[in-house]
């Protein structure tokens, strides 16, 4: 999350072009804001604006600041992905407090606890980075800069890669390995990714150092000027919980729907049929899961395992239940050295980010986050939702999640950059097959072996044809997101991918997964519902409400039905669980609708009318 960079040097080389390049290349990690702080012998400059690093505004400011940049001794910069705290000037980085300057990549989960412990005034809306710099600053006078930083970094729960400056000293530290140093002609440069060093001199790879977990370096070696403008916190369309809760779901009516006598799928599932015993066709045609076994997986990774700690594989990492356990398994069980690649398509939940930080920090794994243009991505979701409301069709609900369908594109791109062959995806769990989503589109064999890429070509054509008809019949879908929707279709269904699907090799055990994550790592379930599935993304709370309101079941019914077929859960137990899991997650629904900028009352009343 976010991109940080900077240098320490003792010359007046022209490096303003390097700053431009860093801001451009790191903008994929964060497009919400950017900035840098520089200090020379007699001058100091802080520039931070709510613009992406590759924008004309930022590049012009760099050019206008070239004189002080070139004469600087220290420079710290960042491109921000807003993960914690409101979008305002104070939360944007670099953060400065009484001579202490910080750039931070990651998430501090216990920032409020640290503020309380050290008597810092914590305000709702403050970023974790702003809290971190205040806490460190409060200890410097008593303990000194290095000791104060070391103490606080040991107490952080979550992930961090930081650069902190104070009185001509610079501390660089990381607990994920997402911070690289390179010494070039007597100056030290640092950045979130090793590839950034190609932006300046050709730094040999053996001169690039990756800061390993919990190890840092200290580099020893006034006029204040701010360029930028203050921006008000982003306005939010907040609907009081008591108002949103009036949009209830009639579970008594749902309870009267006929269901399969073996699983719990209701008669409202598309393409469902029942025999004379009341057993559905999905149960009759079900084939139990077959896994290759842990031995096969160990044999597969043996030839790829790194002996010197360098990255040997990539894991697509959302911070959700499956990918978090997958990260644990790769590191602890297989002894691999993965890089976690995350694509933030605009709807990643705050809880998902915190769980990412918890896992990455404790396992010491580097993360590369590719961020979409968040504001545009959310605007695309809003437009597609409003178009859907004009002509509702349950087969088009997945279009509201089209933004995440290009994940594989970025994973493949970073795989080439890092030069690794193994890519792990924690999809492929056949229990998560959701026939109904594609069933509305005329596809009968949905999620073969849990991998939608393996649809038959006939079903891929059916899906494309269905979408084309829907697009032609609803002009609201002809918006800016049309190209990304088509690209998502190509990446998801057409372009081949050579991935290792973890659950094709090891048994998926819900109890073991949850206990491992919560007890060993402090991984957090959804505070509203206690659920652990589908909480890394902000969309499921809304679309499952929609599904339940309109068809009387959700993806939870499908998931639990597959567990019944596998013999790991009884039908009565599954019914009891889904009645709890299908309860509306009102806080999540409100977050989703606020985030895309639509009035909850307008949307929920329209769904109720349908």
Image: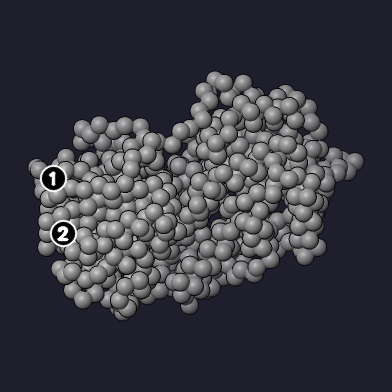
Q: CA distance from mark 1 to mark 2?
A: 23 Å
Q: Secondary structure at mark 1?
A: helix
Q: Nearer the viewer, mark 1 or mark 2?
A: 2
Would you place residue 513 above or below residue 451 in this image?
above
Q: Are marks 1 and 2 in contact (CB under 8 Å)?
A: no
Q: Which x, y percent locates residue 194?
A: 36, 69
Would you place residue 221 above or below residue 278 in this image?
below
How many residues crowd around disc 2 within 10 Å: few (fewer than 14), some, or many (20 or more)?
some
For this view, does 227 lie left or right of residue 31? left
> Is residue 34 at all visible to an observer of this figure?
yes
Q: Which x, y percent locates residue 213?
A: 30, 60
Q: Earlier in the sequence, mark 1 or mark 2?
A: 2
Q: Quadrant of residue 331?
A: bottom left
For this view, does 219 lie left or right of residue 122? left
Q: Which x, y percent locates residue 505?
A: 58, 63
- The residue depicted at 12 percent of the width and 50 percent of the height is 222
**Mark identifier at residue 40:** 2
> Is residue 588 at all visible to an observer of this figure?
no
Q: Quadrant of residue 67?
A: bottom left
- The residue depicted at 41 percent of the width and 64 percent of the height is 25
Q: Secondary structure at mark 2?
A: loop
For this view, does 140 lie left or right of residue 367? left
**Mark identifier at residue 376:** none
The residue singled out by tag 1 in the image is 140
Would you place residue 594 above or below residue 74 in this image?
above
For this view, does 370 lie left or right of residue 73? right
Q: Which x, y percent locates residue 375?
A: 50, 46
Q: Quadrant of residue 555?
A: top right
- The residue depicted at 66 percent of the width and 38 percent of the height is 386
- The residue depicted at 16 percent of the width and 40 percent of the height is 138
């Amino acid at each position: 999350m976010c991109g940080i960079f900077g240098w320490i040097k003792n010359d007046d080389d022209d490096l303003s072009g390097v700053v431009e390049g860093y801001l451009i290349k790191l903008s994929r990690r964060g497009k919400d804001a950017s900035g840098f702080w520089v200090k020379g012998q007699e001058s100091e400059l802080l520039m931070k604006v709510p613009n992406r690093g590759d924008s004309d505004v930022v590049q012009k400011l760099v050019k206008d600041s070239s004189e002080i940049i070139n004469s600087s001794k220290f420079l710290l910069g960042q491109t921000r992905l807003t993960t914690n705290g409101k979008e305002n000037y104070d939360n944007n980085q670099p953060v400065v407090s009484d001579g202490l300057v910080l750039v931070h990549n990651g998430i501090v989960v216990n920032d409020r606890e640290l503020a309380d412990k050290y008597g810092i005034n914590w305000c709702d809306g403050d970023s974790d980075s702003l809290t971190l710099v205040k806490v460190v600053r409060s200890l410097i006078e008593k303990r000194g800069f290095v000791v104060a930083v070391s103490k606080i970094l040991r107490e952080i729960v979550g992930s961090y890669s930081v650069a902190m400056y104070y009185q001509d000293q610079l501390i660089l530290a990381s607990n994920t390995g997402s911070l690289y140093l390179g010494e070039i002609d007597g100056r030290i440069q640092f950045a979130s990714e090793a590839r950034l060093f190609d932006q300046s001199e050709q730094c040999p790879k053996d001169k690039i150092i990756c800061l390993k977990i919990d190890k840092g370096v200290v580099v020893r070696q006034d006029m204040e000027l701010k360029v930028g403008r203050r921006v008000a916190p982003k306005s939010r369309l907040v609907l009081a919980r008591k108002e949103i809760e009036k949009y209830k779901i009639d579970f008594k009516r749902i309870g009267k729907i006929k269901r399969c006598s073996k699983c719990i799928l209701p008669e409202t599932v598309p393409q469902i049929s029942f025999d004379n015993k009341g057993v559905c066709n999905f149960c009759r045609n079900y084939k139990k899961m077959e896994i290759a076994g842990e031995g096969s997986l160990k044999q597969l990774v043996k030839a790829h395992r790194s002996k010197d700690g360098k990255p040997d594989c990539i894991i697509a990492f959302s911070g959700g239940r499956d990918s978090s356990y997958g990260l644990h398994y790769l590191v602890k069980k297989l002894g691999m050295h993965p890089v976690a690649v995350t694509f933030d398509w605009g709807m990643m939940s705050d809880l998902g980010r915190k769980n990412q930080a918890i896992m990455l920090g404790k396992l010491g794994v580097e993360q590369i986050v590719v961020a979409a243009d968040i504001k545009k991505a959310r605007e695309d979701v809003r437009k597609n939702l409003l178009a859907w409301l004009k002509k509702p069709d349950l087969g088009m609900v997945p279009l509201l999640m089209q933004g995440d369908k290009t994940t594989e594109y970025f994973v493949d791109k970073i795989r080439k950059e890092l030069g690794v062959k193994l890519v792990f995806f924690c999809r492929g769990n056949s229990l998560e097959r959701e026939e109904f989503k594609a069933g509305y589109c005329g596809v009968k064999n949905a999620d073969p072996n849990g991998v939608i890429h393996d649809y038959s070509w006939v079903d891929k054509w059916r899906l494309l044809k269905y979408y084309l008809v829907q697009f032609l019949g609803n002009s609201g879908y002809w918006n800016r997101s049309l190209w990304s929707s088509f690209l998502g279709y190509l990446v998801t269904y057409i372009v081949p991918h050579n991935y290792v699907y973890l659950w094709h090799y090891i048994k998926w055990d819900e109890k073991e997964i949850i206990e491992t994550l919560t007890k060993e790592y402090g991984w957090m379930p959804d505070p509203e519902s206690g659920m652990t599935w589908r909480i890394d993304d902000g969309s499921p709370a809304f679309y499952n409400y929609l599904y339940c309101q309109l068809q009387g079941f959700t993806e939870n019914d499908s998931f639990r039905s597959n567990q019944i077929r596998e013999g790991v859960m009884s039908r009565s137990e599954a019914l009891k669980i889904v009645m709890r899991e299908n309860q509306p997650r009102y806080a999540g629904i409100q977050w989703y609708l606020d985030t895309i900028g639509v009035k909850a009352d307008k949307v929920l009343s329209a769904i109720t009318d349908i």
